[in-house]
Amino acid sequence: MAVDQEQNRQRIKQLLRKPGNNHCADCGAADPEWASYTLGVFVCQSCSGLHRNIAQISKIKSVLLDPWRLSEVEFMGSVGNDAARAKYEKQVPSFYYRPSYKDCMLLREQWIRAKYERKEFINVEKQEPYTAGYREGFLWKRGRDNGQYLSRKFILSEREGVLKYFNKHDAREPKAIMKFESVNACFQPAKIGTAHGLQITYLKENSTRNIFVYHEDGKEMVDWFNAIRAARFHYLQVAFPIASVSELLPKLTRNFIKEGYMEKTGPKHTEGFKKRWFTMDDRRLMYFKDPLDAYARGEVFIGSKENSYSLVPDFPSNIQGNHWQFGITIVTPDRMFLLACETEKEHRDWINAIQTVMDRPMLPHEYAVEAYFKHKP
């Protein structure tokens, strides 16, 4: 019996080395050490916990620690990650967000449920909540001034090219209209303080407006997210008719390049340094008094080094005073911005984030954005 067990263990370990099986079937993490012996897939430890939430479909074992029957090993050998993907991901819409191991738990759990529990990518009719081009429902939205979450009706209309919400359930006119041209959405569970927290941003008179929403039902929230991605995809297909799908997909939604606290001083560099929450969103470096503020206190355009933007990982020699010790000087064609980080790691991470943007050549439409910032009152 012990000999059989050892043979089975060696067989299952050999299967792990097959192409496709050496990364998690669901999030792509390297070297998975768990397996669903009812679905025939190898998964990482994090995703194995999510599979346990659908225990009626997926039974999990450790590849290295649990005993394996020969029939289970043979089943794993007959399926494997590549074959399972071919079956369960057969008709994933191109705009649908496929989460990685870096993404939040909600996205990964709903991806796993969509694949194996709801079989959304086998039965196309189950994709209607995010493919129909129209969606309406109620989300809990954070109040701009008081921070209280209230139920608000949201409508997404591909035909109108907008996402809008209403302050009262029977209101005829929306409180805000967000054009697909500038709408973005990203999950922010830690920042918002709920596992289902979504941050929606859009440009209002060329300034960034933040809206924070959530829903108790995780599926509902992820369906809204993918409906926004679908609407953006179709908008961009019309706006850029010769662009390929692979060119458009990175533009559907984006995570912020970096967020966190830094200190800043004013344009004369004589005021005291104040702690602010900073968000690097593509070429916009924004700062807020509070991370959940609706509007930034200020926005800085970060252009490319070819256009006279540069970064110095320190303060000018004449800057003194009470501030965090790790300084950053951002030089733009118009002025210098002095920022301070609390730790050496934050300093290094912010420098890398800003420098990466500066190293990227500016695209034609970004010159128009830069021009707006230069003439901003």
Image (cartoon, rainbow, N blue to C red):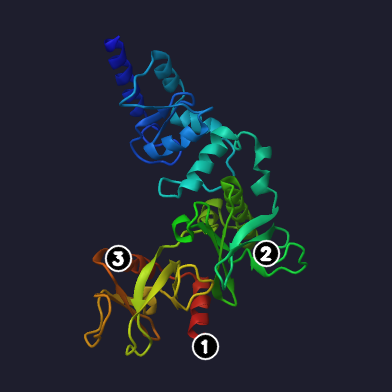
Q: Secondary structure at mark 2?
A: strand
Please give the name of the residue rendered at 49% of the width and 75% of the height, measured from the top-left corner. Answer: 296
Q: Residues within 10 Å of mark 1 (few under 14, many from 20)?
A: few
Mark positioned earlier in the residue sequence (1 or 2): 2
Q: Is residue 197 above or below residue 120?
A: below
Outermost residue, left direction?
317
* Proximity of marks 1 and 3: CB atoms separated by less than 8 Å: no
Q: Is residue 142 left or right of residue 36?
A: right
Q: Is residue 69 left or right of residue 176?
A: left
Mark positioned earlier in the residue sequence (3 or 2): 2
Q: Is residue 241 visible?
A: no
Amino acid type of the residue tagged 1 in the rendering: Pro
Q: Give the residue pinned by disc 2.
A: 164
Please give the name of the residue rendered at 30% of the width and 26% of the height, measured from the top-left corner. Answer: 64
Closer to the camera, 8 or 334?
A: 8
Task: Give residue 123's quadrant in the image.
Answer: top right
Q: Give the residue pinned by disc 3.
A: 346
Task: Give residue 46's quadrant in the image.
Answer: top left
Residue 337 drawn at (x, y percent): 35, 81
Closer to the camera, 142 or 22?
A: 142
Amino acid type of the residue tagged 2 in the rendering: Lys
Label 1 or label 2, whichever lies nearer to me, is: 2
Q: Is residue 306 above or below residue 133?
A: below
Q: Give the residue pinned by disc 1.
A: 377
Task: Give residue 11's quadrant in the image.
Answer: top left
Residue 222 drawn at (x, y percent): 57, 49
Quadrant containing the N terminus is top left
Q: Residues within 10 Å of mark 3 (few under 14, many from 20)?
A: some
Distance, label 3 to label 2, CA atoms, is 36 Å
Q: How many marks?
A: 3
Distance, label 1 to label 3, CA atoms, is 31 Å
Q: Is residue 253 visible?
A: yes
